[in-house]
Amino acid sequence: MLYIRDTSVSNERIASISDLQMLIDLAEDSKYKGTNSANTNIPVITGDIYVDNSIEDIVNESDIKNTIIDQYYPNLHIFVTNVRKAYSAKFIKIDGDNYEVVGTQKVDPDQAETKTWFDDPYVQYASLTSRDHYDFNGWSTAEGDTTKVIYQAVYQPNMYYTYNQATKSYDQSSEYNANETYYYKTPGQDKYSVVILTTDSDKIWSAQTYTEGVYEYNFYIIYNRHKYLMKYLNMDGSVITT
């Protein structure tokens, strides 16, 4: 785990480490070659290290995590004065009081120059769009709020389908209805998948970008439980109750 330096900690309590190269050099020194089955070549270091690097020696968060922490020192907490934070996202499924993070994504500051948004969860976590007894309503920036859904695609006439209850078949759609559930047909297959559509091109996933100064994002999958209507009828077909 990477931490930004806690400014409440006095300089007197911080060891005079000005960069992270020392940790890399230590890990790659041959005299620390391990004798365990993994044959790792790192000394075991745990605890906290404070790195008081200058702004000229600013480092990427992901470089520290991917190289120093994940590869060499998984039990070490590193506090860095100057760090370029990565954009991170959590994709969350909520079932009652149970919060489950079904996916995470990180984008380096360098990557963010060309990768301006996170990978599409409608593709990355496609298996979650189907849930027994529930309707899938999309990925939202706020828990349980369908008004904050980021849509999957822009509606196009005759490209998507609706389900016809009377004929038990899928019909091609020529007009958009916000209350309708739309399906996408896999080319060459008789397979239909729910697709979350809008007519506003600014509200689809591929049109989003990072907000300046905001590095952590949460997205919540939205389900609504199916509602069933039952009617009790007289022999003549008149309704007793519903």
Image (cartoon, rainbow, N blue to C red):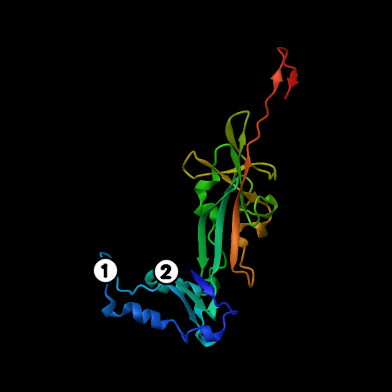
Location of residue 142 (image quadrant): bottom right
- The earlier-in-sequence mark between 2 and 1 is 1
Q: Count how many numbered circles sit on residues in the image.
A: 2
Please give the name of the residue rendered at 61% of the width and 67% of the height, measured from the top-left corner.
210
Q: Amino acid at mark 1?
A: Asn
Q: Amino acid at mark 2?
A: Asn
Location of residue 65 (image quadrant): bottom left
Please give the name of the residue rendered at 53% of the width and 73% of the height, measured from the top-left corner.
3
**Residue at image mark 2:** 75
Q: Dot 1: few (<14), some (14–19), or many (≥20) neighbours within 10 Å?
A: few
Q: Nearer the viewer, mark 2 or mark 1?
A: 2
Q: Secondary structure at mark 2?
A: loop
Asked if residue 111 is positioned above or below residue 223 in the image, the reply reads below
Q: Position of residue 137 (x, y in %)?
A: 62, 47
**Residue at image mark 1:** 39
Q: Nearer the viewer, residue 165 or 92?
A: 92
Q: Secondary structure at mark 1?
A: loop
Q: Dot 2: few (<14), some (14–19), or many (≥20) neighbours within 10 Å?
A: some
Asked if residue 227 is positioned above or below residue 184 in the image, the reply reads above
Q: Position of residue 123 (x, y in %)?
A: 51, 53
Asked if residue 21 is positioned above or below residue 103 in the image, the reply reads below
State the separation of the CA atoms marked 2 and 1: 18 Å
